[in-house]
Amino acid sequence: MVPTAPKPPLSGKTILVSGGSRGIGLAIAKRAGRDGANLVLLAKTDQPHPKLEGTIHTAAAEVEAAGGQALPIVTDIRQPAEVQAAVEKAVERFGGIDILVNNASAIRLTGTAETSVKRYDLMHEVNGRGTYACAYACLPFLKKAQNPHILTLSPPLNLRPEWFGPYPAYAVTKCTMSLFAMAWAEEFRAFGIASNALWPRTTIGTAAIKNIIGGEEMMQKSRTPDIMADAAHHILSQPSQGCTGSFFIDDEVLLAAGVRDLSVYD
């Protein structure tokens, strides 16, 4: 009798990804799709954008081409009612939620004088408040899941002033996400829900890098989103009760997992 090959670790898992239409969020979704996971993609881009690649619908097609099932839901995570409705649609389609990936983020790398209150509000509403809204809506279903995880894409908590001085508003909003990741690890420990954060060592070649930070030159110096996707896959494959409360860096995760050639991500 030929032994049956083990199922991939994320096979059949239902994963909700905010900001899932492109970049790192889409890369994480496609990597999970290769395992046969169900991906719930939340994003605002419903129609093609002149400066942004793809839409939530093309992202869903890429996930399904990779081997997963996809449910694209046009959602503004600044609106709690929209987030709640999206979660309800996900549960109706797939029966529950096993993993939440808080990827959606707004960025503005400017100092205080160049950052209007309106822009400040946008970053806080997406980064901190939106992350909270997604966790709040998913929590009842994560409590019922086997091996539930929350993974938030935010930096390690480091209060050295040089990390905050150049662009205070953005840095503070990203650290808000990190504070939630840390707090939830403790709060949800009794439910067996893992909560971790993941951050890249280098810049990652995404639309934000191309359009906001450094154009094509910076894109050439950046790693591909696949390094974050592979690192996230490794974290989300771990037993939740033994892998929580950490601030992970992408290449450190892969080196610990036995990956030795990181040049594939150049």
Image (cartoon, rainbow, N blue to C red):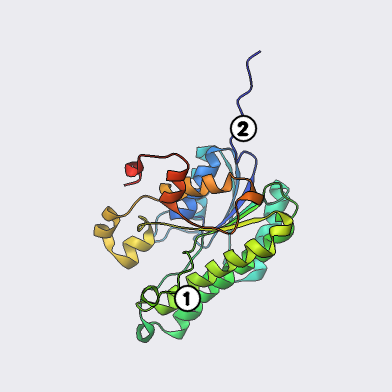
User: Looking at the image, is mark 1 or mark 2 earlier in the sequence?
Assistant: 2
Q: Residue 28: x percent and y percent? A: 50, 49
Kindly identify the residue that appears in the image at 40 percent across and 55 percent down: 53
> Which is more toward the observer, 93 or 15?
15
Q: Is residue 154 left or right of residue 131?
A: left
Q: Residue 68's image quarter?
A: top right
The residue furthest top is 1
User: Where is residue 22 drawn, in percent x and y?
Assistant: 45, 54
In depth, the one of 212 and 253 nearer the eye is 253
Q: Which residue is mark 2?
A: 7
- Give me the residue at 53% from left, 67% from top: 178
Q: Is residue 256 above or below residue 249?
A: above
Secondary-structure class at tag 2:
loop
Whether residue 58 appears in this view of the structure is no
Up the image or down, 132 lies above or below 204; here it is below
Answer left or right for 224 relative to 150: left
Do tag 1 and tag 2 residues touch (Cβ < 8 Å)? no
What whole-number distance in Å separates the C-alpha atoms at marks 1 and 2? 41 Å
Residue 123 lies, in percent from the top left, at 48, 74
Looking at the rendering, which quadrant does residue 265 occupy?
top left
Which amino acid does the dot numbered 2 rest on?
A: Lys
The number of numbered discs placed on residues in the rendered structure image is 2
Q: Position of residue 204 (x, y in %)?
A: 37, 56
Q: Is residue 220 left or right of residue 98?
A: left
For disc 1, the marked residue is 172
Q: Residue at x 27, y 55 (%)?
A: 221
Please state which of residues 88 and 139 is positioned toward the viewer in this rendering. 139
